[in-house]
Amino acid sequence: MEKFKITVKLNCKAKDVFTGWLNSKTHSAFTGGAEAVTSVNEGGSFSAYDGYITGTNVEIFPHKRIIQKWRTTEFDESDKDSVLELLFTQKEDYTLMALSHTNIPDGQGEKYKKGWKDHYFTFMKKYFEKETV
């Protein structure tokens, strides 16, 4: 199994990125318009990136942390879900979002690390730049 951690600086309040992650419309905007169907409830299921990503919310600590079971259509049926932990830290005028992705099937970690950067963080930075103008 593989794992990695990435941190991104976003020009917004921690509350905004946290609530956006759990909001279907905003989450879709985070991916450049790919459809997301989210849930704000622990145990609630979600899908993102037009169904490529699916999972369930394991724990939700308002404006601070989200833990999700997570998988893509590229996981084998026998693969266990990976675990995604998102931490939101409010700084003076920005938020640090730390993403820890663990239990990734062997050979897929680098691809998902690149995917988070290219398909989420790039769009999230643009989204929050636009929101602050």
Image: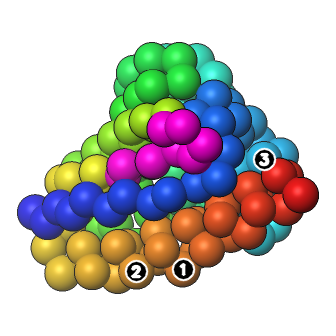
Instruction: State if disc 1 and disc 2 touch (CB < 8 Å).
Output: yes
- In which quadrant is the C terminus drawn? bottom right
Which residue in the structure is indicated by mark 3?
26
In front here: 45 or 117? 117
The amino acid sitting under disc 2 is Lys
Which residue in the structure is indicated by mark 2?
114
Instruction: State if disc 3 and disc 1 touch (CB < 8 Å).
Output: no
- Give the class, few, some or many, for how many residues have Cα within 10 Å of label 2's Cα (few <14, many ≥20): few
Residue 67 figure quarter: top left
Alpha-carbon span between mark 2 and mark 1: 6 Å
The amino acid sitting under disc 3 is Thr
Q: Within the magenta stretch, is there residue 96?
A: yes
Alpha-carbon span between mark 3 and mark 2: 21 Å
Left or right position of 129 against 120: right
In front here: 26 or 88? 88
Q: Within the magenta stretch, is there residue 94?
A: yes
Which segment is the magenta one? 91-99
The amino acid sitting under disc 1 is Asp
- Give the class, few, some or many, for how many residues have Cα within 10 Å of label 1's Cα (few <14, many ≥20): few
* Residue 68, disc: none
Q: Secondary structure at mark 3?
A: helix
> Does label 1 or label 3 sit earlier along the sequence?
3
* Residue 118, disc: 1
Q: Is residue 28 visible?
A: no
Residue 8 figure quarter: bottom left
In front here: 16 or 56? 16
27 lies above or below 1: above
Instruction: State if disc 2 and disc 3 touch (CB < 8 Å).
Output: no
- In which quadrant is the N terminus drawn? bottom left
